[in-house]
């Protein structure tokens, strides 16, 4: 019997569907193989190189990776990456991490930048569809109260409560992070905010991934003057800025302020591009102190997230030897949750070697932490995992056996808790008020050209 046209088309259709399903199955199998290879590299290379894990924590991280490896087929790419981030965070060491949002741009972001003030999470900068959210307090993300949402993403990064909050400014604005922890099912999410006038909910879609391989700090978006905020609508666009937020891209600067106060802002432990070096800046500052001794010196480290501690150490040691260092409270060191890594070292040194006081909030790490190290790039996904293998121990706790000779500095401090605790409220911020240091006038001492 000759086949009918209808039966021929039917068989042809079945054949086409069969080919499609076979290709789909092959693609899924290939995906599982690639992820399995990456997970093995993370388990056998990354975990073995990092020295910050306790044995118990290392076992837990291996178990996390193994559970994910056995369930690749049931997990999305975002969930697998989130599992790897959690495995790194089990180290309980903030330098041990997956490079997802801050140091690299592996995950996408929504078109808003947020900050957690002492009275809530607020939108400080926005663009595109997120502009109506600007200047308002976030109450919910996709129907989940903001603090519950933060609890979901917090395990993606290690660190103390301050650093965990800082990392939340990234993860709470990333659709991939929210999908990775199961808070949303796809990349679209609603952000609900409240303001003095009314409540509002806006549905946001992610911006295209920016293939960035350099860091982006969330604190940059606290100031409309930072180049990173160019093109964004900003909450402080028409507000006079305090010294801490003026020209924030400048790594280091000092100013002569009213009441004979010398204000020194040290935002990054690295040589500023096209600027005088940290060494030259330090020498100029010490010379200025010697020729015109101030009544007080304010060293602002609140936005110093690290760099090369050796560059600024001569300056910090010189400050600790100055006459000001012998007067209780004559040097005030401003610290906060984004005082991190090499940004912590000056605060610890001055607490240990002078009568300086710490003012603000606890730095973004403990006195003892593991840093240095290097990167392991997973071969298929391209995800970068950073391991830490150099101990920085600034407390007076006993040094672990076999490590003492590798410590970069000898600093003994009881803690890094501020002597005077102060924090930033939204009300102060939106008014352009710095609750810790708000002089009437400051004259910047610019570097000679």
Image (tube, rainbow, N blue to C red):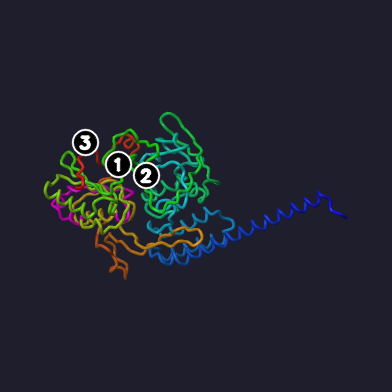
Query: Which residue corresponds to mark 1?
Result: 245
Residue found farthest to the front = 449
Instruction: Report the Cα–Cα distance between label 1 and label 2.
Output: 13 Å
Q: Which marked residue is nearer to the observer: mark 2 or mark 3?
A: 2
Q: Which residues are magenta?
A: 315-342
**Crowd around label 3: few <14 · some 14–19 · many ≥20 (10 Å):** few
Q: Earlier in the sequence, mark 2 or mark 3?
A: 2
Residue 351 figure quarter: bottom left
Comes first in the chain, label 3 or label 1: 1
> SS at mark 2?
helix
| Residue 77 relative to residue 323: left or right | right
202 with respect to 220 (left or right): right
| Image vertical order of residue 41 relative to residue 191, above or below | below
Examine the rendered structure and indicate whether residue 373 appears above or below residue 448: below
The answer to whether mark 3 and mark 1 are in CB contact below 8 A is: no
- Residue that label 3 marks: 440
Disc 1 is placed on an element classified as helix
In this rendering, is residue 158 above or below 391? above
Q: Mark 1, mark 2: which one is toward the viewer?
A: 2
* 381 magenta-colored: no
Viewer-side residue, 12 vs 120: 12
Measuring from the top left, give residue 57's x and y in whole percent: 43, 62
Q: Residue 449's x, y, as percent?
A: 20, 47
Give the CA separation, mark 3 to mark 1: 15 Å
Q: Nearer the viewer, residue 286 or 170?
A: 286
For image coordinates 32% across by 63% down, the residue present is: 391
What residue is rendered at 39% in x and 48% in y?
A: 165
Quarter of the image for residue 45 reads bottom left
Q: Which residue is mark 2?
A: 228
Most extreme residue toward the left is: 291
Q: Residues within 10 Å of mark 2 (few under 14, many from 20)?
A: some
């Amino acid at each position: 019997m000759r086949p009918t046209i209808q039966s021929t088309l039917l068989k042809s259709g079945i054949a086409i569907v069969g080919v499609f399903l076979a290709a789909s199955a092959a693609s899924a199998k290939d995906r599982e193989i690639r992820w399995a290879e990456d997970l093995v590299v993370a388990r056998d290379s990354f975990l073995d190189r990092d020295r910050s894990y306790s044995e118990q924590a290392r076992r837990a991280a291996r178990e996390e990776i193994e559970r994910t490896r056995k369930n690749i087929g049931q997990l999305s790419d975002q969930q697998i990456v989130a599992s790897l981030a959690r495995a790194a965070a089990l180290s309980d060491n903030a330098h041990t991490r997956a490079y997802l949002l801050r140091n690299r741009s592996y995950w996408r972001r929504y078109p808003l930048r947020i900050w957690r003030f002492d009275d809530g999470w607020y939108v400080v900068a926005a663009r595109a569809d997120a502009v109506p959210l600007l200047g308002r307090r976030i109450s919910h993300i996709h129907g989940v109260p903001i603090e519950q949402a933060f609890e979901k993403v917090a395990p993606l990064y290690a660190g103390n409560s301050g650093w965990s909050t800082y990392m939340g400014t990234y993860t709470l604005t990333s659709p991939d992070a929210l999908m990775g922890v199961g808070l949303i099912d796809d990349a679209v999410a609603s952000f609900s905010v409240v303001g003095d006038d009314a409540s509002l909910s806006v549905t946001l879609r992610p911006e295209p991934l920016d293939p960035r391989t350099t860091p982006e700090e969330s604190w940059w978006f606290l100031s409309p003057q930072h180049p990173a905020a160019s093109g964004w609508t900003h909450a402080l666009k028409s507000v006079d800025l305090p010294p801490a937020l003026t020209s924030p891209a400048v790594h280091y600067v000092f100013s002569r302020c009213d009441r004979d106060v010398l204000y020194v802002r040290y935002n990054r432990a690295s040589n500023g591009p096209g600027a005088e070096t940290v060494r030259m800046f330090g020498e100029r500052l010490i010379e200025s102190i010697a020729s015109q001794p101030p009544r007080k010196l304010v060293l602002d480290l609140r936005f110093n997230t690290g760099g090369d501690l050796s560059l600024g150490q001569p300056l910090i040691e010189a400050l600790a030897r100055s006459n000001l260092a012998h007067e209780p409270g004559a040097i005030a060191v401003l610290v906060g949750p984004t005082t991190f890594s090499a940004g912590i070292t000056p605060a610890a040194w001055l607490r240990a070697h002078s009568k300086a006081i710490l003012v603000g909030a606890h730095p973004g790490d403990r006195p003892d932490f593991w840093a240095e190290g290097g990167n392991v790039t997973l071969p298929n996904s391209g995800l970068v995992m950073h391991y830490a293998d150099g101990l920085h121990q600034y407390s007076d706790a006993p040094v672990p056996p076999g490590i003492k000779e590798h410590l970069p500095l000898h600093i003994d401090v009881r803690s890094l808790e501020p002597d005077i605790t102060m924090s930033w409220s939204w009300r102060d911020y939106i008014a352009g008020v710095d609750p810790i240091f708000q002089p009437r006038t400051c004259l910047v001492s610019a570097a000679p050209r």
